Amino acid sequence: MKDAEIVDLYWDRNEAAIQQTQQKYGAYLSKIAYNILSDFEDSKECVNDTYLQTWNAIPPRRPNKLSAFLGKITRNLALNRYSRETAQKRGG
């Protein structure tokens, strides 16, 4: 399925959008999250959070490049989780 069609599914609030996103970009997003977090379970949770955040962001936003949009969300979520985890380990 093309990115524009996936975005249209989000726009129409069709839950198939998440399934299509997972099918097309799941491995890509998992790799981004795992490269930052180095933990399979945390990475999986981060990717699931990406789907939720994407669902909430489209509409009103219509991304020009879906892969970059998803990658940025995943990266930011993973970096936030990493910061929280390292802060807890330091006792802060």
Image: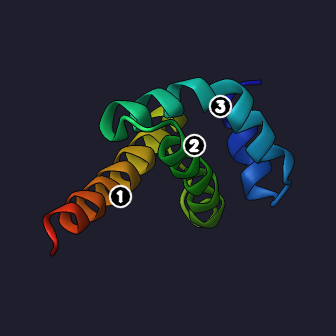
Q: Position of residue 85 (x, y in %)?
A: 29, 59
Q: Are marks 3 and 2 in contact (CB under 8 Å)?
A: no
Residue type at the position of mark 2: Lys
Q: Which residue does the image show at 52% across and 25% down from the upper left?
A: 28
- Is 25 placed above or below 12 here? above
Between the C-alphas of marks 1 and 3, the distance is: 28 Å
Which residue is more in the foreground, 91 or 27? 91
Q: Which residue is mark 3?
A: 3
Indicate left or right for 87 with 1 as reference. left
Q: Which residue is mark 2?
A: 44
Sequence-first disc among 3 and 2 = 3
Q: Which residue is mark 1?
A: 81
> Element type at marker 3?
helix
> Element type at marker 2?
helix
Residue type at the position of mark 1: Arg
Q: Position of residue 51 (x, y in %)?
A: 63, 51
Sequence-first disc among 1 and 2 = 2
Q: Which residue does the image show at 28% across and 65% down from the upper left?
A: 84
Q: Are marks 1 and 3 in contact (CB under 8 Å)?
A: no
- Is 76 placed above or below 65 here? below
Q: Determine the image quadrant of residue 49.
A: bottom right
Indicate left or right for 67 with 10 as reference. left
